[in-house]
Image (cartoon, rainbow, N blue to C red):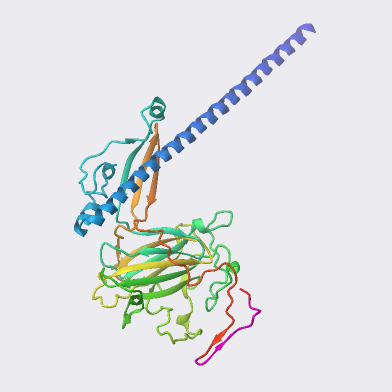
Amino acid sequence: MNKQSGAVSLFVVVFFMLLVTVVTVSFLRLMVADQQQASNNDLSASAYDSAQAGVEDAKRKLLEYKNYCAVNTEASCTLASDATHLSSEVCNAALVNNVGVVATSKTNEVLVQQSTSTNDVLLDQAYTCVTMKLNTEDYVGSMAANKSQMVPLTSMSAFNRVRVEWFSKEDVTTSGSGTTVNLTGANASGQPLYAQGQWPLNRPSLMRAQLMQVPGSGGFTLASFDNVSGANSNGATMFLYPTSIPGTPELAMTTYDQRKTDPADDPNPKDPLMTPTAITCASNLNAGGYACSSTLVLPQAVGATTDANRSAFLRLTSFYNATHFRVTLWNGPIGATSVAVNFKGVQPLIDSTGRANDLFRRVQSRVDLFDTTFPYPEAAIDLTGNFCKDFAVTDSQYIAGSTACTP
């Protein structure tokens, strides 16, 4: 009996020791995994910071390029931006060479450190490859609700069409997959305008597209944008309304221009051309991209003989909802004969790869190479309270309103 009790005790001790060993080993494995994860997170953040350092150095080089173009000829500026100079695909070459100098060989990585102290050296951070693309195939950006963005339509060659795409997966705010676009009831006849709070959630914004152009690159006055001569025009305004209605792939801006052509003109609200233009939008974003897309056919500028002879801007305004957008330039009708046209020095693309020890991160950044801080007005009148207009004016008299009207 005593021998049997001793054997049971031995088995209990053995099993207990095995249990303690398993728990200890598991705990140590968790500690090591957490430490490795923390180390990887730290290295990843450091590599990202290194890549961002390359982006900032590229921005300084773009500023140098902008200053270079301000004091040199257009031909010299164009040469400085081509594929063997500033827009070189040679890693880091555009950053270490002066603007306008041809890059011919690969440049070593650039260390990221504040000093040569031991601590900075041990961090082992660098950006390994930074390249810039000055002339891009598109212009991308984002707008808050009821805000505008001015896009210079400066191109590498002639164009006569602008494609506007907006509302991406990033703009969908519902939980879950975040790919469903709310177009319920958006196929009714006419396009109703709502109060701000009544616009359906996750419905693409109503986009206003305003064209402003003049022939060539000479001077102009504000009155120039109202010039219309036959099929030529220096301006046009369209309201692009998101719907599920199958629409026309191309829209002529002069046909759908919703500005008054005469100060005395009072547009007929029942005229189909005096309502927002229905644009076909996708009901989901499973495949990515943008929900809404419209190609706008541009008129030639008044006095211009070719599509290449224009200085133009496109002003986009996102009503009701915030949105991401993309603008591309085209020459010729949609189809096999349509040719994509690159923007010229409007929004350069910076591609930077950073390193921390043996972990790499890559980032891409867009930089607007024009003044984005100019305070373009959003409206003729902008106020935070109510607007009180309680009076009347005729050809012969002024009629004052009541004193009860308090803005």
Residue 12 vs 57, above or below: the answer is above
Residue 291 in the image: x percent, y percent?
Answer: 47, 63
Q: Nearer the viewer, residue 317 or 382?
A: 382
Residue at 38% over, 48% down: 364
Does residue 401 show up magenta in the picture? yes
Q: Nearer the viewer, residue 407 or 50?
A: 407
Kindly indicate the quadrant of the structure image that contains residue 404. Answer: bottom right
Q: Looking at the image, can residue 277 be seen?
A: yes
Residue 102 in the image: x percent, y percent?
Answer: 20, 46
Q: Looking at the image, can residue 247 be seen?
A: no
User: How many numbered marks are there?
Assistant: 0
Kindly indicate the quadrant of the structure image that contains residue 314. Answer: bottom left
Q: Nearer the viewer, residue 261 or 358?
A: 261
Question: Which quadrant is home to the C terminus?
Answer: bottom right
Does residue 191 show up magenta in the picture? no
Residue found at the very far top of the displayed protein:
2
Would you say 94 lies left or right of 271 here?
left
| Dominant secondary structure, magenta | loop
Question: Which quadrant is home to the N terminus?
Answer: top right
Residue segment shown in magenta: 395-405
Residue at 59% over, 54% down: 175
Residue at 20% over, 54% down: 79
Q: Nearer the viewer, residue 154 or 218?
A: 218
Residue 161 vs 144, above or below: the answer is below
Would you say 258 lies left or right of 200 here?
left
Residue 256 vs 28, above or below: the answer is below
Residue found at the very far right of the displayed protein:
1
Residue 349 vs 393, above or below: the answer is above
Residue 40 in the image: x percent, y percent?
Answer: 47, 33
Residue 126 in the image: x percent, y percent?
Answer: 36, 35
Would you say 280 lies left or right of 222 here?
right
